Image (cartoon, rainbow, N blue to C red):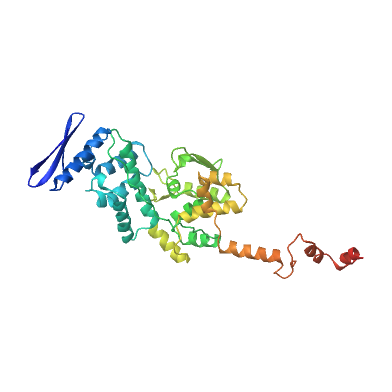
Amino acid sequence: MGTIYKRSGDIYWVQYYRNGQKYRESTGSTKKADALRLLKLREGDVARGKKPEIYYDKIGFAELAHDYVLDYKVNAKKTLAKAERVVRLHLLPFFGNCPASKITTTRVKQYISHRMDQGAAHGTINRELAALKRAFNLASRSTPPKVNGTPYVPLLAERNVRQGFFEHDEFLALRETLPPYLKGMVTFAYKTGWRVGEITGLTWSQVDLNRAVVRLEAGTTKNDEGRTIFLDRELVEVFKEQFRNRQLGCPYVFHRNGNPIKDFRVVWRRACREAGIEGKLFHDLRRTAVRNMVRAGVPERVAMAVSGHKTRSIFDRYDIVNLRDLEQAALSVARYLGDVPGTPADPPGTKKAHNMMLTQKERASREG
């Protein structure tokens, strides 16, 4: 049986037991009725086998964030660095001193507003919210649970999906302006659609120049699936040139003076500016490679095997059209409807359209 009492001053406290363990909790109120109401609530939780809410109030968000990062470490996830960065730069500064039980949907929306004021894109905020939600899910599944339920985490509509790609003349102009150590690398990306990390991490142990084959071992890719591609003539020459310029002690196919290629964004932006195609991303080469393979008649299953796309939905996002595609579509429809000189005025297949394409002699013969 629980009791109420005044511990200091006029503030009421409640005392109750669960499994023989004593719990004390301040009501924060000077009214006896509020204390009785809280005591009944806590005794009801105990009767239903629930832990007292005060237990969860002692667990701060910092502990949940630590467990979230730890989960990435023990599972050797490739995005560990990103997870640590999201927690360190955004989630902890906002939620760090807050008890996990006090993080409500309203508090989450305040975080969203805070990040939007900082200029973060919807997609970026959604990735951070996914980390927040994951931290709560892990806490709820721990033994014993560290949270008594998880808050609803609303996501934002993402309207910033990029759809950039290169036309062939744009790619050639860009390659011409890039420094030598990046030329072969972008050519490989343009032809295969590989991710930048897969290319910069490619080593000679994965290359068989005699057979013109390059392999990625299972577990080294984003989707953990290995894949093998065959090099065309241009790429064979690229790899031969890289082999001639290899550096002692450097295992990488693409390198910068024997060192791994890491951040080249400044060089990339300058080259794009000089080529007159500002705003292009390296990832646009991946989209372009997929689109080019589809247009060349490569079966989609094979194109996915080359580029490393695992899900069909992601693959569809890269098979995009451009203004030339739309112009060609309009012209094709115009020809079909006869709006272009020299084409039938009626849709092919109709009797009238077919008769218009007959010679006068054939028409006279049929009518006679």
The furthest residue to the right? 368
56 over 360 or under it: above or below: above
Specify whether 257 is left or right of 344.
left
- Observer-nearest residue: 221 or 257? 221
Decide if residue 51 is in sight here.
no
Q: Where does the N terminus fall, quadrant-wise?
A: top left
- Observer-nearest residue: 149 or 318? 149
Decide if residue 330 is in sight here.
yes
352 over 257 or under it: above or below: below
The furthest residue to the left? 9
- Observer-nearest residue: 208 or 39? 39
Q: Where does the C terminus fall, quadrant-wise?
A: bottom right
Specify whether 176 is left or right of 80.
right
Specify whether 324 is left or right of 359.
left
- Observer-nearest residue: 62 or 172? 62
Q: Position of residue 340 (x, y in %)?
A: 70, 69
44 over 287 or under it: above or below: above
Number of numbered tags placed on the structure image: 0
Q: Which residue is rendered at x = 42% and y = 59% of the image?
A: 268
The furthest residue to the bottom? 341
Specify whether 103 is left or right of 78.
left
Q: Position of residue 83 (x, y in %)?
A: 33, 46
Q: Which residue is rendered at x = 53% and y = 41% of the image?
A: 228
Q: Position of residue 356 (x, y in %)?
A: 80, 66
The furthest residue to the top? 20
Q: Which residue is rendered at x = 70% and y = 65% of the image?
A: 337
Q: Position of residue 154 (x, y in %)?
A: 37, 51
